[in-house]
Image (cartoon, rainbow, N blue to C red):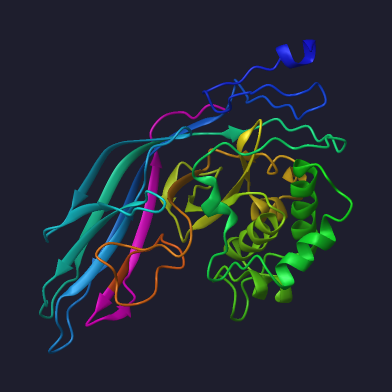
């Protein structure tokens, strides 16, 4: 019991409920790294084709949470807009309709904000002799045990999950076995086509892809094993640069276990940095900014097409058909970041 009393939790991240001396233990770092920066998200609006109707446009917005504080958010738009919040995951976004535009310079919608991003790290101890794992106690968990359109939890994904966790009873040990399988089997490879859709079965078969593919396979296998897991997406910040453009998104995952709560994982970063494999099972560094959570996102007003596979770039429809818009992302550190 002395060991239990010594556990200290910071930021109010995890509430330790009563559990036996053989249960899992964790502690968040008191010296977590912090990064402070300005972020700019620019969406360019091109001229309209002849006879086109209004362009409908949805732009994701970041939210504050326990590990990310968003301040001084400003939206600069030559067109009227409204801020919305979707019901399932609570993601926030801007919605607007752009009237037909004649030829000329592209208009811009610019979103600017300040970010304080804190490292999220959980100390994990695996004890494979726990017979009765504690039950989840969060009302949001059922959704994160369900399938997504491209992340099934039956069939080949269920079979693979069962195979990789065979003989393992303790949930954290199951999660680690799945993580180890993804790391050993997948490779970060964006050549050719098929990657980037977050299709768990494609990732299982091709055994390659980018962060969406890594984490779709990881999340699907976890959910098939009865462990709630969620998908998160945002942008990465180069750890060795203090400002500049960001070429594209990055995504990661979290899974839920008592007594920890949500446990961070970044499987694709672990693949890129093998020396940090243990770190990224239980940690997200501060070199990132999160925008949205979840897959199959249903926006309001609803687009003409299917729910969004994931939501990080601006989504636009012209005459009911998706249209790709040019976008740019940049950051600038505002203070000397703690390490």
In front: 134, or 305?
134
Residue 173: x, y in percent?
Answer: 80, 44
- From this viewpoint, is residue 207 visible? no
In the image: residue 320, left or right of residue 202: left
In the image: residue 85, left or right of residue 286: left
- From this viewpoint, is residue 161 visible? yes
| Residue that extends furthest to the bottom in the rendered view of this protein | 50
Q: Which residues are magenta?
A: 317-339
Residue 11, above or below 47: above
In the image: residue 191, left or right of residue 329: right
In front: 207, or 141?
141
Residue 80, above or below 265: below
Q: Quadrant of residue 39?
A: top left
Residue 214: x, y in percent?
Answer: 65, 61
- Please name the residue shown 18% across and 86% down the image: 49
Residue 154, above or below 335: below
Q: Is residue 314 in the magenta section?
A: no
Q: Which quadrant is home to the N terminus?
A: top right
Residue 75: x, y in percent?
Answer: 21, 49
Q: Quadrant of residue 208?
A: bottom right
- Please name the residue shown 32% across and 70% down the image: 326
- Please name the residue shown 22% across and 44% down the image: 74
In front: 215, or 173?
173
- Please name the residue shown 46% across and 32% down the image: 66
Number of disc labels:
0
């Amino acid at each position: 019991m002395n060991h239990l009393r010594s556990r200290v939790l910071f930021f109010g991240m995890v509430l330790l409920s009563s559990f036996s001396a053989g249960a899992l233990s964790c502690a968040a770092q008191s010296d977590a790294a912090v990064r402070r920066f300005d972020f700019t998200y620019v969406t360019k609006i091109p001229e309209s084709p002849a006879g086109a109707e209004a362009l409908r446009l949805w732009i994701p917005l970041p939210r504050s949470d326990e590990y990310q504080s968003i301040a001084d958010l400003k939206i600069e738009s030559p067109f009227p807009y409204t801020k919305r919040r979707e019901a399932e995951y609570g993601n926030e976004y801007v919605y607007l309709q752009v009237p037909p535009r004649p030829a000329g310079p592209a208009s811009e919608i610019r979103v600017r904000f300040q970010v304080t991003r804190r490292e999220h790290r959980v100390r994990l101890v695996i004890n494979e002799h726990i017979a009765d794992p504690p039950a989840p106690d969060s009302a949001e968990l059922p959704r994160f045990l369900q399938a997504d359109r491209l992340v099934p939890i039956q069939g080949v994904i269920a079979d693979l999950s069962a195979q990789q966790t065979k003989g393992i009873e303790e949930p954290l040990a199951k999660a680690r076995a799945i993580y180890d399988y993804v790391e050993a089997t997948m490779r970060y490879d964006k050549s050719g086509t098929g990657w980037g859709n977050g299709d768990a079965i494609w990732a299982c078969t091709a055994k390659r892809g980018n962060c969406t593919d890594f984490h779709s396979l990881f999340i699907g296998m976890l959910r098939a094993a009865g462990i709630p897991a969620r998908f998160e997406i945002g942008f990465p910040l180069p750890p060795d640069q203090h400002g500049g453009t960001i070429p594209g998104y990055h995504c990661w995952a979290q899974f839920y276990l008592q007594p920890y709560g949500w446990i961070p994982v970044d499987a694709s970063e672990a693949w890129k940095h093998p020396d940090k494999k243990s770190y990224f099972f239980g940690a997200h560094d501060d070199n990132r900014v999160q925008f949205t959570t979840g897959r199959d996102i249903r926006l309001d007003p609803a687009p003409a097409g299917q729910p969004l596979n994931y939501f990080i770039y601006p989504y636009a429809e012209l005459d009911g058909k998706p249209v790709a818009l040019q976008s740019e992302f940049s950051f600038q550190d505002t203070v000397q970041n703690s390490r």
